[in-house]
Amino acid sequence: MSQPFGIGVIGFGHRVAGLTSQLLAGCPRIELAAVCDPSAESVAAARALAPGVQVCADVAEMLRNSRVGWVLIGSPNQFHREHASAAMRAGRDVFCEKPLATNLADCLAIRDVVRNTGRSFFFGLVLRYAPLYTRVRALMDQQAIGEIISIDFNETLGFNHGGYIHQDWRRHRSAAGTHMLEKCCHDIDIVNWMVGSRAKFVASFGGLRYFIPANRGIADDIGPGPTGRRAFQEWPQTKGDPFTLDKDIVDHQVAIIEYASGVRASFHTNCVAAIPERRLLLLGTRGAIRADLNTGLVEYQKLGWDEPRVVYRSVSTAADHAGADSQLVVALADWITKSAPPRTGIEHALDSAVTCFGIDAALDERRVVEMQPLWKQAGIQA
Ligand SMILES: NC(=O)c1ccc[n+]([C@@H]2O[C@H](COP(=O)([O-])OP(=O)(O)OC[C@H]3O[C@@H](n4cnc5c(N)ncnc54)[C@H](O)[C@@H]3O)[C@@H](O)[C@H]2O)c1
């Protein structure tokens, strides 16, 4: 019997616990060898999944365990630099959840460690694994819509999802970065991928309008949810009150981007949408594509007289990111057991983060931001 493939998890919270349990279920030769997490609840979840797991007091202890060949990072974003760097310096390949880090200096520090150590760095931009977006990309490759002229895309979150964000560690920029970075870096990455160019100018407006104390009573107007929990508390991990001022993130934001290729895009996010969407509308010289991760549909229409046709229908739900989570787990298993290179690496991580940093600078400073200085600072040819 050959040796198992041992993984260590730093931050065994909701996200990476879910990925790990799917990984172990799909690939019995992968074992959860060690875990490092300050939460007793998260450690108990790790032990329930793998009773023999080594529970480490700190990352250094985990990295002394020679059974740990790969490290998966699911800690809050402020720790990604420290955790990813330590693991790669100790000779481990790393899977790191998005976003790369909360600020540019930390992002560049991780990039430098990837370069200097030569380790494999798998970055969790899960939406790239959604068959729905792969289908959109394939249509683009077939020139189905000619050249993109402009794009409209959004991520409007259901009110329980938004309520969860506004009571979790994600409500603090120091822990998570901005809402655009923490939540919408996926959507920015998908559009970066479709456009195949980098942002040249960005502008943005946004603020905190809804999740404030004056609106707390709206929960009573809405009434309890399907599980009997109060409105804004239905998201499984919810543990608090989203209507406090103890936070520094926005609850809605709009942004416009002009890419170096000339494509123009507008983006809209909102944390209290009665109609949630994750919609991407690409308008090209020869046709249009509309894809929505929530409905699971891709519609296509060539310029002409016909109605748009559904060309793809996801069988998975939005909870699985329309099949992306399952595909990501397959890619993780191949990366670990077959050394298959990841589809999403440090370059995608940095491109999406830098675009988000530019958008948030535009919001904070109320100006159009020219991206070239940021790309230059990141050492990226724009
Ligand atoms: N790709 C996606 O779709 C997706 C979805 C959700 C979350 N995420 C990302 O996954 C990461 C975790 O998010 P989550 O929703 O699981 O959050 P979570 O709060 O459920 O989990 C975070 C875990 O990290 C632990 N932790 C806190 N400080 C730590 C430290 N210093 N060292 C080690 N562990 C520490 C916590 O105890 C907790 O168990 C974040 O980076 C988040 O952005 C990605």
Image (tube, grey):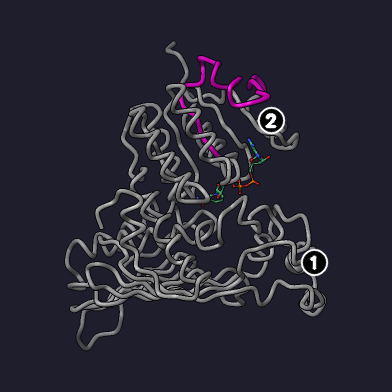
Identified by mark 1, the residue type is: Arg
Q: In this orientation, does residue 226 appear?
A: no
Q: Residue furthest bottom?
A: 305
Residue bearing the label numbered 1: 230
Task: Where is residue 156? Give x, y as percent.
Answer: 54, 71
- Using a 10 Å C-alpha cutoff, classify the residue at mark 2 as few (fewer than 14 neighbours), some (14 to 19) or many (20 or more): few
Residue bounds of the magenta highlight: 51-73
Task: Where is residue 369? Give x, y as percent.
Answer: 39, 70
Q: Residue 161 vs residue 277: left or right? A: right
Ligand 1: quadrant of the figure: top right
Q: Quadrant of residue 127?
A: bottom left
Measured along the vertical axis of the image, is residue 284 above or below residue 346? below
Foreground residue among 91 and 306: 91
Identified by mark 2, the residue type is: Ala
Q: Is residue 96 magenta?
A: no
User: Element under label 2?
Assistant: helix
Foreground residue among 160 and 121: 121
Q: Residue 38 vs residue 310: left or right? A: right
Residue bearing the label numbered 2: 48
Measured along the vertical axis of the image, is residue 340 above or below residue 150? above
User: Element under label 1?
Assistant: loop
Q: Is residue 63 magenta?
A: yes
Task: Where is residue 327? Give x, y as percent.
Answer: 41, 46
Name the residue: 79% across, 63% down: 229
